[in-house]
Amino acid sequence: MKLVALGLAVAGAIALSDAAAAMPAPPQPACETARVYSEALAGVSVLVLKDGRVVCESYGQGGGPDAGHEIWSGTKSFNGLIAAAAVQDGLLTLDEPVSLTLTEWRDDPARASVTVRQLLTLTSGLRGGVGRAPGYGEAIVAPLSAAPGAKFQYGATPFQVFGEVMRRKLTAAGRDPDVLAYLKSRILDPIDARWSDWRRSPSGDALLPQGAVFTAREWAKFGEFVRGGGVVDGKPLVDPATFAQLFTGTAANPAYGVSWWLPVATGQPDVVTARLDLGVHAAELPRDLVIAAGAGNQRLYIAPSCGLTVVRQASFDPATALAARRQTDGWSDYAFIKPLIDAYCR
């Protein structure tokens, strides 16, 4: 185990350099509590920033500041920011019909009514499920299993449909049609954040529901961008009104916004929703806490009112998890984040 506690000044994107790591400070008890809890459940990294300053950073079980780890469904939360950038660029609106772009959906009354917002809130009616993400071509012909807006169905397909929407929008605008190139140029380059890898389907389509690989430090840069309201150096990189809407749940599942999890109590029976136990403790947590969450308990927690950004990563073998029919292995988001909230959210 390696534990580093740092205090770094930042301007715009956070600066997490090896040189700065040469200035260790005694770790706070809450950092040690988080580290011990995380590592007991296959954790490889914990990184905590308070007001843009790194207050604790720890690595174990093969983790390190330069080691990228797949964040699995933590990838999904990039989609909301892609959409907010696309709104600012005049490419789309959240409430436009998907069939405005996927013209082959127009002859099906149910599909014709699906909106971009419904894709990204997982209320489009497209069948849910955890597992392999389809390519864009396969995703856009997937059947609906519920009326649009009526039911929350966690799964990969809606994000791949969104990928095809973005591909066609970018093509029509005369831009590079690769959605990852768009994300990189519009958001990640301006905040100086880099992925270690980002998987694609066999057909070459970017995987938008899963597949991003980030170091803890690089994922934290994205978290800091969100904590700052999507603004860098006083300039909004995405549409502000759309950005604000990313963190509002739906009637179908108030604990899920536009690609972001929220600590809101819900009677939603979905098993993925139930894995995050923050809703039952909502009264004890910052009201503006938002979470990007992936299998194996990959987590990015952001609480703007506290100036707090927290990354937690872990080793995860999906084949083993599937065989065991479990993904959480005793993990509690509340047990991990509450000591950090108590220590730094004052």
Image (cartoon, rainbow, N blue to C red):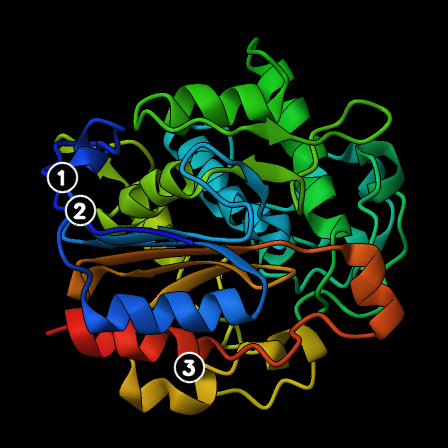
Q: Judge from the rendering whether residue 104 lies leftward or rightward of residue 271; answer left or right.
A: right
Q: Residues within 10 Å of mark 3 (few under 14, many from 20)?
A: some
- Which amino acid type is shown beneath numbered disc 2? Leu
Cβ atoms at labels 1 and 2 below 8 Å apart = yes
Q: Secondary structure at mark 3?
A: helix
Q: Quadrant of residue 165?
A: top right
Tell me the number on the disc at residue 6: 2
Q: Amino acid at mark 1?
A: Met
Q: Quadrant of the N terminus?
A: bottom left
Looking at this rendering, what residue extends furthest in the front direction?
A: 1
**In this image, 30 relative to 323: left or right?**
left
Of discs 2 and 3, which sits in the foreground? 2
Amino acid at pointer 3: Ala
Q: Secondary structure at mark 1?
A: loop
Circle 3 is placed at which residue position? 335
Q: Nearer the viewer, mark 1 or mark 3?
A: 1
Disc 2 from disc 3: Cα separation: 23 Å
- Circle nearer the N terminus (1, 3): 1
